[in-house]
Image (cartoon, rainbow, N blue to C red):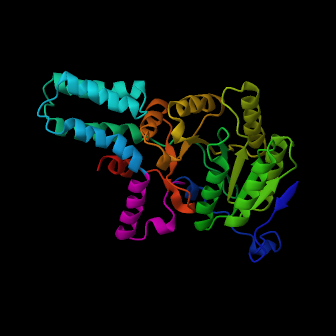
Amino acid sequence: MAIFRKKKHEKDPTVNPVETPQNPDPDNFVDIDVPMENEEKSENHREGVFKRLRHGLTKTRSSFSGRIDTLFAGKKEITESLMDELEEILFTSDIGVNTTQTLLDAIQDKVTKKELKDPRKLKEMLKTHILSLLDQEPIEHAPPKPGEPLVIMVAGVNGVGKTTTIGKIANRFKQKGKTVMLVAADTFRAAAVEQLTIWGERVGATVVQQGTGADPSAVAFDAMTAAISRNIDVVLVDTAGRLHTQINLMEELQKVHRVIGRKLSGAPHEVWLVLDATTGQNAISQAEAFQEALGLTGIVLTKLDGTAKGGIVIGISSQLQIPIRFIGIGEQMDDLRTFNAHDFVRAIFD
C-alpha cells in the first residue's frame, strides 16, 4: 500500500504523536453542507456568491423562466392553451414527466377552485411549489463516534467529474481545518489514481492507493486502518466509475461498502452520488440504481453551467427525495457550491 503524504512544508501528524490533530466532536460533522468560511463573511460577499450562481445557471434560466415569462406576457387569464404550453416548457426543461404532472395538478386544482386566475400569480405559485420539492430533509444516519473519522463513499459513472468533485470537497474540509484522507478505490484505471493523487497534493490531503487492478475492497480496508490510527477527520473514498446497468460491478461497490462497515461500525456515514446534469433524465435512472444498491444520503450535480436543462435538479429531488448536497457551476475550485434551494429557485426565476 502506497501512501502519499502531505506536501513537505506541512507537518506530518504521524511524526510526533503529541501533535496529532484532535478529532473533533462528531456533531461538528452533522451539518456538513455549511458554507466555507469565505462564503459567509458578509452580505456583500454572499450577494457576490449568488451572482456567480445566477451566472452559472444562465442557460437554464433563459430556457426555463425566460420562456415562462414570454408565455405569460400580456396574458390576463389562465387558459387551457396556456397550461398546455406551460407543460411543454416544464417537460423540455428536464423536470421529468412525474414532477411536471405534480406541478400541473397543483396549479389546475387552484384554477378549478377559482383560487388562481392571474398568470402572474401562477408564476409565484410555481416558484413556491418548486421550492417545496427541492427542500428535502436530510437523511438520518448515525454520525461517527468521538475519535472516529467521518467516512464518505463517493460513486458515479465515468465522465461525471467524480474524482474532481472529491478533490473539491476535500478542499472544503481542509479549509475548515479538518485532516483529510483520499482513498483511491478506483483501481481499474491508472489515470484515476493519478488524478486523485494530484488532487491530494493540491489540497494537502493524504492519499492511499495500491497498484492498478488491486482489490478495491482491500484498498478501502487498509485505508480505514490507516485513517483510524492517524486520527484522520474525514475519509473520502473514490470508487470505480461504472454504468449503473452493470450488475457485477454494482455488486463490487456493495462489497466495498460492507468492508468499510466491518472495519468501522456505522461507516460509511455518507454515500454520495455524483451526477452529470447534462445527461438529463438518464441521471435519474442512474440515481435510482445506485440508491437501490447503496442507499444514498446525498447527490452532487456537476456541469449545471453547461446545460439549459437544469430542471433536472427539480426532477431528481422530487422523484428520489434524496438531498442535493452540492452543485457544480464551473471549473474553479470554489465553483462547487453548497446547494441552497432558496438561492437556486431565485437564480433561475429572478
Q: Position of residue 185 (x, y in %)?
A: 77, 46
Residue drawn at the location 53% of the way across and 61% of the way down: 334
173 magenta-colored = no
Magenta residues, as a range?
A: 32-56
Image vertical order of residue 98 relative to residue 296, above or below: above
In the figure, is residue 107 to the left or right of 14? left
* Left or right: 13 as drawn, with respect to 47: right
Q: Could you tell whether 232 is left or right of 117 in the image?
A: right
- Seen from this angle, which residue lies furthest bottom? 9
| Residue placed most toward the observer, 121 or 133 | 121
Quadrant housing residue 28: bottom right
Measured as percent of width and height from the top left, residue 229 is found at 80, 59
56 or 214, which is in the foreground? 56
Secondary structure mostly seen in the magenta stretch: helix
Which residue is pictured at 74% across the width and 41% down the height?
240
In the image, 249 versus 55, the foreground residue is 55
